[in-house]
Amino acid sequence: MNKADEGKLAYLLDLLGVDLGKLHVGNGKLILISGGSCSGKTSMAERIVKHAPQFKVLNTGDFFREEAKKMGLSIGELVKASDDELLKLDKSVDSRIITYLAQTDECLVLTSRFAALWAEVLGKLGKPSLNVVLSVDASEKVSRMALREFKKGRFDLNEMEANKISEELKRDERDAERYEKIYNLNPFSFYKYARWIDTSNISEKEVWKKLAEMVDEYIIGDLKVSNRGLKIELPK
């Protein structure tokens, strides 16, 4: 990792109040899958736990709800929460996630737009993980979203449906902006340290074939730091 990114991670951990030197490092294996909406994160996580039953999916939404409850906020009330309350909530959830991942003895799969960031934090702690990014180009993302949300082709959407999808597509940018506001770093910049699968022009079956090879290699312990920075070229 370059020095600039090392500094950004140190700053993030300082803001979160996480002292890596005081964390117990658990023995659990971790598979961290990053990617934006419609990149296939959820379907691949489901395939992993079927393929390797010792793994289970970590639902970070549970952390979010629990931390919100501690602050006296229900999920329905979050739309009325102040910026300060939301920032405090984000930091509490992020701190809890990284601490949990570091100390767990369980084998977990975590899907998130920014899981590659957590993989690098864990790397600083000396806990290896399988760090994978699933990407999808803008055109294919729209097509998948149109099918998922409206059971239509992208060119068959009416104006209201097209606007809804357009708004959904901005989520990745908004989330990245939120991270930059809180932590002064772009979480997408850490994608370069992950293994990368472009899912745009291949089937789910083909994506899984590539991912399954990585998972099997990681489970038997042969995949270590060599997983970093490797771009997987898939057939067009």
Image: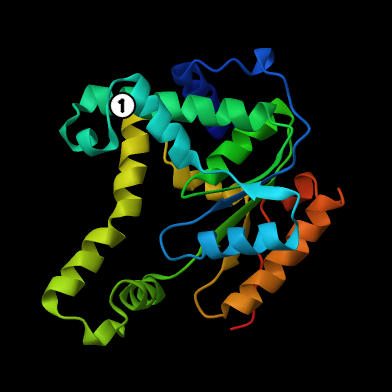
Please say if 179 is above or below 204: above
- The residue at the point 64 percent across, 64 percent down is 47
**Amino acid on which the number 1 mark rests in the picture:** Leu
Foreground residue, 40 or 135? 40
Please say if 9 is above or below 197: above
Foreground residue, 91 or 184? 91
Which secondary structure, mark 1?
A: helix
- The residue at the point 55 percent across, 18 percent down is 18
Quadrant containing the C terminus in the rendered view = bottom right
The location of residue 232, given as percent across then percent down, is 66, 66
**Residue 185 placement: quadrant:** top left
**Residue 87 placement: quadrant:** top left
Please say if 82 is above or below 174: above
Residue that label 1 marks: 87
The location of residue 20, given as percent across then percent down, is 64, 19
The location of residue 100, given as percent across then percent down, is 60, 29
